[in-house]
Amino acid sequence: MEIIKAQNVNFYYGSFHALKNISMDIEEKSVVAFIGPSGCGKSTFLRLFNRMNDLIPKTRLEGQILINGQNIYGKNVQVDQLRKEVGMVFQRPNPFPKSIYENVAYGLKVNGIKDPNVIEERVVESLKGAALWEEVKDKLKKSAYALSGGQQQRLCIARAMAVSPQILLMDEPASALDPISTSKIEELIRELKKQVTIVIVTHNMQQASRVSDRTAFFYMGEMVEYGRTKDIFTNPEKEATQNYITGRFG
Amino acid sequence: MKKILEKFVKYLLTASGFITSFIILLIIFFLFSEGAGLFKNHIIDDGYVLALNKNNPVNTLSAKQVKGIFDEDITNWKEAGGKNEPIQVFRLNDLLSMYPEEELGSEYEHAGSKIKEAILQNEGIIAFVPKSLLTDTENIKTIPDQTIPVKDVLAGTEWFPTATPSPLFGILPLLSGTLWVSFFAILIALPFGLCVSIYMSEIASDKIRNILKPIIELLNGIPSVVYGFFGLIVIVPFLQELFNLPVGESGLAGSIVLAIMALPTIVTVAEDAMRNCPRSLREASLALGANKWQTIYKVVIPSSMSGITSGVVLGIGRAVGETMAVLMVTGNAAVMPTSILEPLRTIPATIAAELGEAPTGEAHYQSLFLLGVILFFITLFINLSVEYISSRKK
């Protein structure tokens, strides 16, 4: 069952044609990795799924993106409601300058949940889900900035998961982290896959092969190849994909 | 050759740094030494003496009591701790109405003895006469002269620097005038400034911001006397009409003018702080389903709080030290303010208005320097708080 359906998507920054006629289906509760050299459009494509590109002036979209069968760029779509369903984790950990507890509770509060018992329950659950609970349970009132980079990124994952999204977008979530923190995040992705659909952008091909079910290779604004991860890495159909995964460019 | 030049430049730079600091220290030292000189002055004008009949049980009088007696606010000795007897005030020119000119002598050579005679004859008398005329003080009680007490200045509620025989230098009316005007100015400027800076940093398009920002910064460049003029012509009559006041010159008029003047500082600094709120934080908030307003008041404003506070405190700093505009619109009554709708007077306005008429080196002149010292401490305190708030950011 497809949760995301992109149909003939073209995207422009001003006159720059950033995404060229991309169509793609993403299965529910699977992990899809976007790979490709810098500037190929993979992050731009990812940010279309929660309409984050709306914030950038002078951009234009053609084609449509359906989530659960509904066009998210349709007229009656409430963007904040959409973003609650489609969570996002960014390249660099970006906790708020608030306490650890408040960081996780933020999404719940802005979505109108007021009952402190419900909030506390969700905060604990999310921190456990992000494998962070044991490390922070004694310092929930401390500033999130006191955590290490890897802990901050897991906090951001907990924060995103607290509002129970259906889809989690991850924009190079481990690129600013050390190898141990990275492996923790990867482990977490395999765990979270049971609850949500994950779309992850990564520069790291080993990471893509380790965590994803399907992989899409982007090059110069086009989606060159999209298929099962195993096939892409062992037997790619296109020569460009072959060249990229063997490190001949990129 | 190059080395010599480098050394020369180095010494030149060092010297200019030292000279600048030295000059600033010198100015502060000058301010303090002149200001402290006030407390070496006596409560009664130099060269004069206050004389009483020796049967009067009163031995000392404070400056405030002396002023009350000579203003005829105190008319009976029992109010000053003496017997129930009316006070008879005697000044030098009363001598001419008491004695015909021929009795005083052609060169007034008998004036001294006649003064003594007048003092001896009236039990209720208080005479304010030159020391040189009253050389023989047998059977006459003189009020012992004392220097101006620090308490009377710092906690005094009356500012009459030109009263004779004893001027009063209570700074509280001026200090509270300054604080009142500044406080209300910030009360007005803060919500406006915050709204404008939120609008400019979060809502306005680049095009509008590029027009609006230079205009607001231009407000900083207008001379304060122009603001004062504007206040006098527009705000003062408006307030008079609105609140049905006898005079429109009031603390509130000063506050409004100051609020307009502090606005550009607040807006510029607060807007910068909010624009510097990292994009990643805004994106994090929006990605969690928060709308634009929730993002502004839950993330942008809290994370730029230190910048906003700095802007406000800098605005206060400007308001506290502002002279000309305030002088023109506050009515300048040196009384303890009871309402912001009444005329009041600020410290800078007092210095500007009175320095011209205060004789150099005398008590009045030194009291104005003391006001300068107090203003210096207020602004120093404000600047230190800005430093503290901005350093807390990390």
Image (cartoon, rainbow, N blue to C red):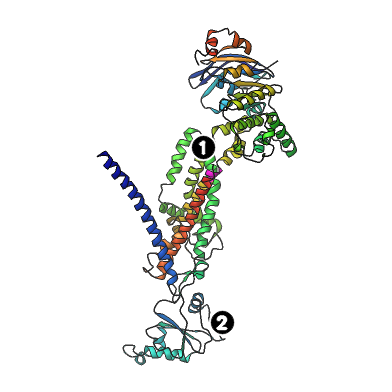
B146 over A130 or under it: above or below: below
The count of marks equals: 2
Q: Which residue is mark 2?
A: B81
x, y percent for residue B86: 53, 85
Cα separation, mark 1 vs mark 2, equals: 67 Å
In the rendered structure, the residue with mark 1 lies on which chain? B
x, y percent for residue A207: 60, 19
Residue at x 44% of width, y 58% of height: B328
In the rendered structure, the residue with mark 2 lies on which chain? B
Question: Which kind of residue does numbered mark 1 sit on?
Answer: Arg
Question: Which kind of residue does numbered mark 2 sit on?
Answer: Gly
B272 over A39 or under it: above or below: below
Q: Which class describes the residues within 10 Å of circle 2: few (<14), some (14-19), or many (20+)?
A: few
B367 over A250 or under it: above or below: below
Q: What residue range appears in magenta? A: B304-308
x, y percent for residue B176: 52, 61
Q: Nearer the viewer, residue B228 or B242?
A: B228
Mark found first going from the N terminus, 1 or 2:
2
Quarter of the image with the N terminus of chain B in it: top left
Q: Residue furthest right?
A: A117
